[in-house]
Amino acid sequence: MLNLAFLDFDFALNEDEPPALTTESTPAQHLLFEKWKRCNHMFLMLMKNSISMLIRGSIPDSENAKTYLAYVEEQFKGTSKAHASTLILKLVTTKYDERSGIRGHIMMMNDMAHKLKGSDMEISDGFLVHFIMTSLPAAYEAFKINYNTQKDKWTMSELIAMCVQEEERMKMDKPEVAYLATSSKKRKNSNPRKEFAKVQKTNTGASTSSQNSTGKPFCKFCKKYIHKQKDCSNFKEWLAKKGIPFNPEAGKKPKNTKTGE
C-alpha cells in the first residue's frame, strides 16, 4: 500500500470506476477515465505479483482492483480472527517489566488496541487507560490510587506524560535507597569488635615460639622457617599501618611462682 501510494496507483482504490466514455464525454472526463484505467491496471499487476503462486489460484479473478482486493481480504478473514485472538491474549497478559521504559510499554499496548479496532473490536480510550494502569507493578500503587481519586480522566497522551514523570521520579529516588542498602550491608558485615579481636589475637601470637619438628623457628605471618613472628619486620610494619601497638610479651604464660617456670 505504501508503494502504491508513492506511485499514485492507489487512485483506483480510492475512486470508483468512472462511467464509460461516450461521444459526449468532456476532455476532463477523458483524462479522469484514462488516469483511473492506468492506475487500476498497474494496481492489479503489482498486487498479483506480490501474491504467492500457491494461493493466487484460490482467489477469484477480477479486472477491478478494489474488487480483487476485497477477494483477497475474504480469503484471509479466518487468519485475521486468529490474529485478533492472539492480540487480545497478549493485551490482557502484558505486564510492565520496569526495564523497557514505561513510554514504550504504553505505546505497545495502545498499538495492540488500535490493531483490534481494525478487526471491529474497538476499545475505548477510557477503558484502555484503566487497563494500562492495571498492567503497572506494585511500585506504582500510590500513583494508581492518586489517579483513581481524581475526577478528571486522562487521555492517552496525558497518561504517557504522567507515567514518564512518575518513572523519572522513582529513578531519582532509587540511588539513595541503593546507597542506604549498601551502607547498611557493609555495616552489618563489618564488626569492629571482631576485627580488633582478630588483630589482637594475631599480635598476641607474635611472641609464640612456633617451631617445626626439627626445632627451626617458624613465622606465622610470612609462613617461612626463618624467624619467629615477633621478630618479623613485615609483621611489625603491618601492625604499624593498622595503628596497633606491638607487644612482644603478649601471649606468654605467666611464670609459676613456686617452680619459677
Image: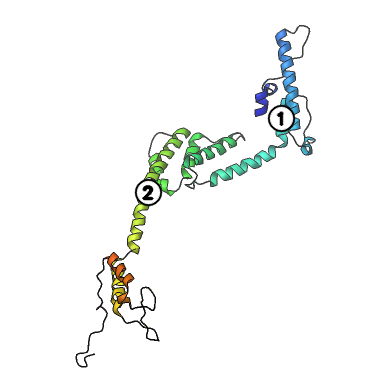
| Residue lying at 77% horizontally and 38% vertically, measured from the top left | 55
Q: CA distance from mark 1 to mark 2?
A: 57 Å
Question: Where is residue 162 shown, x and y percent of the image?
Answer: 42, 37
Residue ranking furthest to the left: 257
Say above or below: 142 vs 19.
Answer: below
| Residue lying at 73% horizontally and 30% vertically, measured from the top left | 47
Q: Nearer the viewer, residue 229 or 32?
A: 229
**Residue at mark 2:** 175
Residue ranking furthest to the front: 226
Residue ranking furthest to the bottom: 259
Say above or below: 121 vs 182.
Answer: above
Q: Amino acid at mark 2?
A: Pro
Image quadrant holding the N terminus, namely top right
Say above or below: 203 vs 35.
Answer: below
**Residue at mark 1:** 70
Q: Nearer the viewer, residue 221 or 233?
A: 233
Question: Where is residue 248 shown, x and y percent of the image?
Answer: 26, 77
Disc 1 secondary structure class: helix
Say above or below: 138 vs 22.
Answer: below
Question: Where is residue 247 shown, x and y percent of the image?
Answer: 24, 75
Instruction: Answer with left or right where residue 226 lies relative to residue 18.
Output: left
| Residue lying at 71% horizontally and 30% vertically, measured from the top left | 70
Q: Amino acid at mark 1?
A: Ala
Rate crowding at label 1 as few (under 14), some (14 to 19) or many (20 or more) other CA atoms within 10 Å: few
Disc 2 secondary structure class: helix
- Does the image show residue 88? yes
Q: Which mark is residue 198?
A: none
Question: Where is residue 19 shown, x and y percent of the image?
Answer: 74, 15
